[in-house]
Each structure stands twice: as C-alpha cells, then as structure tokens.
Image: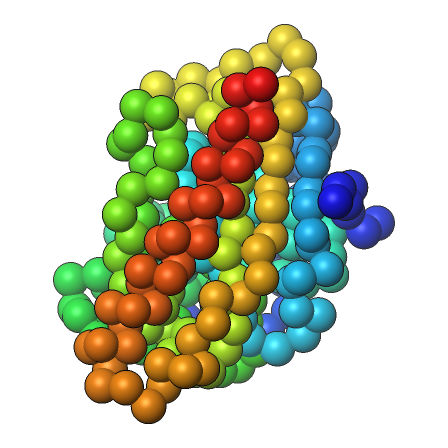
C-alpha cells in the first residue's frame, strides 16, 4: 500500500505543539526535500493520531530525520527526536533542538539517561528513536544490532512501540561522506509497521522483558529494512 501523505534536557511541551523552530525548519527544508526525493510513504495510518508512542527507525544517513520528520508532520503529528546530549550544547544547533522540543539523553548514564524520554512520551510525545545508536556501518546499509533504549521506554510508559523502515535517503546524502547528490529526484521509501507486541512481557522480570522485546524489534525491523532494500535493488 502506498500513501503519498496528508496534506537542562526536555522542554515541557505538549505532545504535538509546534514552535518557531519547526516552522523555520519547514520553510527552509521542505523545498529542498521536494527537489531531492520522490516520496513513497506506506502504511502511515499505523501512526497513532494522538498520544505518546515510540517510533524505532533504522538509520542510513545523516539526513534521515528530515525525511522521517516530513512524513510524520504530514500526518498531523509532531516528532520529537531522541538525541545525544552533545547536540544540545552548541549555540545554534542546541537552540533549535531545545526549541523544537527534542529530547536530550545522556547515553552514559544508564537507566537515568532515558528518564527525559520517558517523561516526554508520558506527556504525549511521538518520540523517534534510532535504536542502532548511530548511522549503520554495514557496507550494505542494512540493520545493525539494536540497543535497548526504545524497548525500555515503551515498557516503562506502556506506549506502543512502532517500527519504521526507511530506504533511499543514503542515495541523496551518503552516510559518512559529507556530500549531497543532486541532479535527479530519487525514491525515498518509509514503511510504518504494526506495533511490536510487548504486553505479554510486562509481568516478566525487567531484564528478561527488555531482552525479549529487543529481539522482537530486531527481527521485525530487519525484515522491513530488507524488504525495502531488495525492492530498491530491483
């Protein structure tokens, strides 16, 4: 199915509030996105229309948040990206991240490091997590081994954990190369999956629940990414 879309840490913003930072980003980035990509958005109806949720997406390019954010905004939701603390400490970039309501996470601080993310989801945020922890380093661009943060947040909040596979952004902004490839519009596919089932894990010891949940997310998201990669290869 294809859907071309409908036309100190965390800031205490409502789940889908948009401030000046988001309108500035739309004004600057939207024309560039339209020039660079042909959007193929699939199963966007699986995104919840309101309330907190955790979106776990694979990571193929530095530009991934632009393309994923565009798709989420087109559905009437406002994404909040979970990002490492260092991004919040520079003057210009840090202002934008804080003003847009993104979530600062200290990955060196264990369980306490995701407290801000849990609070954001409990306030109704649609939180985007890249559970690989970085842009994939696999030569074929496919999914690396996942970290546990997205599953831990979903278990603590009882929010749905929704996998999102993306492919094609790396043809426009190749990972780790510091360049943009222009000249023709390239297909960028985003596929929203069904929520990963976690309800049966909530009565298990937390460590066991997290381990099983991460494996379920790994299997689901890897299959989705492989599907898109194989389609683009053909």
Left or right of 27, for residue 223:
left
Q: How many marks are shown on the rendered structure?
A: 0
Q: Is residue 205 above or below residue 99?
A: below
- Give the colour scheme shown: rainbow
Query: Horizontal and vertical percent for residue 39?
Result: 70, 34
Q: Is residue 143 above or below residue 168?
A: below
Quadrant containing the C terminus is top right
Any part of residue 44 in sight: yes
Query: Horizontal and vertical percent for residue 155?
Result: 38, 79
Residue 34 or residue 163, whichever sits in front: 163
Which residue is painted at 29% across and 69% down in the image?
A: 212
- Residue closest to the far bottom: 203
- Residue closest to the far right: 7
Any part of residue 13 in sight: no
Which residue is painted at 35% across and 25% down in the image?
A: 140
Residue 133 or residue 151, whichever sits in front: 151
Query: Horizontal and vertical percent for residue 53?
Result: 53, 71
Q: Is residue 96 above or below residue 119?
A: above
Quadrant containing the N terminus is top right
Which residue is painted at 33% across and 90% down in the image?
A: 203
Residue 200 lies in what quarter of the image? bottom left
Q: Is residue 180 above or below residue 20?
A: above
Which residue is painted at 41% across and 45% down in the image?
A: 222
Query: Horizontal and vertical percent for residue 171?
Result: 51, 20
Residue 159 or residue 115, whichever sits in front: 159
């Amino acid at each position: 199915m294809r859907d071309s879309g409908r036309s100190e840490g965390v800031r205490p913003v409502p789940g889908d509030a948009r401030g000046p930072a988001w309108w500035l980003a739309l004004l600057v980035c939207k024309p560039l996105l339209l020039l660079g990509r042909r959007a193929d958005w699939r199963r966007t109806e699986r995104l919840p229309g309101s309330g907190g949720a955790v979106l776990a997406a694979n990571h193929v390019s530095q530009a991934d948040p632009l393309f994923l954010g565009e798709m989420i905004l087109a559905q009437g939701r406002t994404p909040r990206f979970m990002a490492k603390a260092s991004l919040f400490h520079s003057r210009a970039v840090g202002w934008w991240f804080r003003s847009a309501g993104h979530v600062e996470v200290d990955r060196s601080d264990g369980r306490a490091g995701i407290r801000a993310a849990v609070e954001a989801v409990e306030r109704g945020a649609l939180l985007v997590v890249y559970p690989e922890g970085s842009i994939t380093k696999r030569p074929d661009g496919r999914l690396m081994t996942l970290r546990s943060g997205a599953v831990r947040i979903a278990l603590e909040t009882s929010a749905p954990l929704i996998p999102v596979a993306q492919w094609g952004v790396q043809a426009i902004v190749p990972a780790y190369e510091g360049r943009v490839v222009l000249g023709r519009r390239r297909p960028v596919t985003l596929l929203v999956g069904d929520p990963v089932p976690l309800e049966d894990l909530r009565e298990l010891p937390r460590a066991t629940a997290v381990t099983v949940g991460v494996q379920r997310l790994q299997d689901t998201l890897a299959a989705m990414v492989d599907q898109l990669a194989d389609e683009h290869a053909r």
